[in-house]
Image: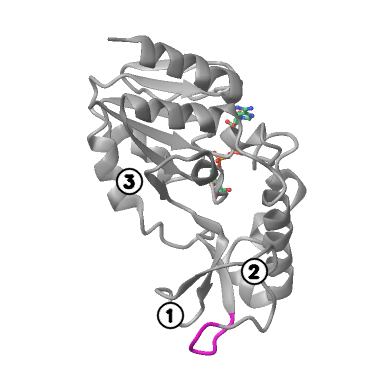
């Protein structure tokens, strides 16, 4: 089976009702990430950070995957689909995709602050001060903050190297190392960037830009790929 590798960002979840980060109505337009998504923010104002992720988790519990997530599940009928996502939501999982690698963590999980190997599912939406790991330390969101290492980038690069097709969906490609993955993809492999306001100016060989919303552009592309013999 041909390998399709997907790099998804916040744009794929926008039509499910989750905000992106850098759109005009994005989260980093309303909040300062330095106060919410850095180790320093956690040290300075742990309760505000917990509240920020609790608010996002509450939203996640009331939204559903959209046609773009579903189309990527359909693609598995004919291709070996590997999803590398920058998103911390679980919409790819809930749509039914079977091979997902989170680069920036998972909103519905918590992690020990003394032993990062201790990771727990969060039941419901709330992670509170006083919620502790089995070693008695405060739990934190299992999310990669600015300035922290992206531990899954090695496996993600290896997956990208093997791509026969590479789909980039709903990401501004503003954040490294995730944005650099496209350069691991073999030159000859066709790449598709699906984003209504794609402004990517990099020099990537064999790149096809589809200026559509994900919920329209991804199902259309998947239909083409499934029709190909
Ligand atoms: N369909 C597809 N793409 C869309 C849609 C849509 N309906 N709406 C917006 N977009 C595009 C925007 O044009 C933009 O290029 O989605 C992209 C969202 O970009 P960002 O808000 O920067 O989100 P993302 O690229 O996922 O951010 C990367 O930055 O803040 C960190 O860790 C955070 O994982 C995140 C990382």
Q: Which residues are magenta?
A: 133-138
Residue name at image x 59 percent, y 67 percent: 122
The answer to whether the residue bearing label 3 lies less than 8 angstroms from the nearest atom of ligand 1 is: no
Indicate which quadrant contains ligand 1: top right
Towards the viewer: 33 or 120: 120
User: Left or right: where does residue 213 sit relative to residue 163?
Assistant: right
- 134 w.r.t. 108: above or below: below
Give the secondary structure at mark 3.
helix
Marker disc for residue 41: 2
- Residue that numbered label 3 is attached to: 156
- The local secondary structure at tag 2 comes to helix
> Which residue sits furthest bottom?
136
Distance (Cα) linking label 1 and label 2: 20 Å
Q: Quadrant of residue 187?
A: top left
Find residue 65 and report its horizontal and vertical position in percent.
60, 37
Residue underneath mark 1 = 115
Q: Position of residue 36 (x, y in %)?
A: 67, 62
Above or below residue 116? Residue 96 is above
Residue at (69, 75) in percent of width and height: 128
């Amino acid at each position: 089976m041909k390998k399709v590798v997907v790099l998804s960002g916040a744009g794929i979840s926008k039509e499910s009702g989750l905000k992106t980060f850098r759109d005009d109505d994005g989260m980093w337009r309303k909040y300062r990430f330095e106060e919410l998504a850095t180790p320093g923010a956690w040290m300075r104002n742990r309760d505000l950070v917990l509240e920020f992720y609790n608010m996002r988790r509450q939203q996640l519990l009331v939204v559903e995957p959209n046609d773009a997530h579903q189309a990527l599940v359909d693609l598995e009928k004919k291709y070996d689909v590997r999803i590398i996502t920058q998103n911390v939501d679980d919409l790819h999982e809930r749509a039914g995709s079977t091979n997902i690698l989170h680069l920036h963590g998972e909103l519905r999980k918590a992690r020990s602050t003394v032993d990062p190997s201790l990771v727990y599912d969060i039941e419901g939406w709330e992670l509170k001060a006083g919620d502790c790991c089995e070693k008695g330390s405060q739990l934190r969101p299992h999310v990669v903050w600015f300035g922290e290492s992206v531990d899954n980038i090695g496996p993600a690069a290896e997956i990208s190297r093997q791509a026969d097709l590479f789909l980039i969906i709903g990401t501004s490609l503003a954040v490294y190392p995730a944005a650099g993955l496209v350069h691991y993809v073999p030159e000859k492999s066709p790449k598709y960037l699906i984003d209504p306001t794609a402004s990517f100016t990099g020099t990537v060989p064999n790149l096809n830009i589809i200026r559509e919303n994900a919920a329209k552009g991804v199902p259309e592309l998947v239909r083409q790929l499934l029709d190909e013999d």
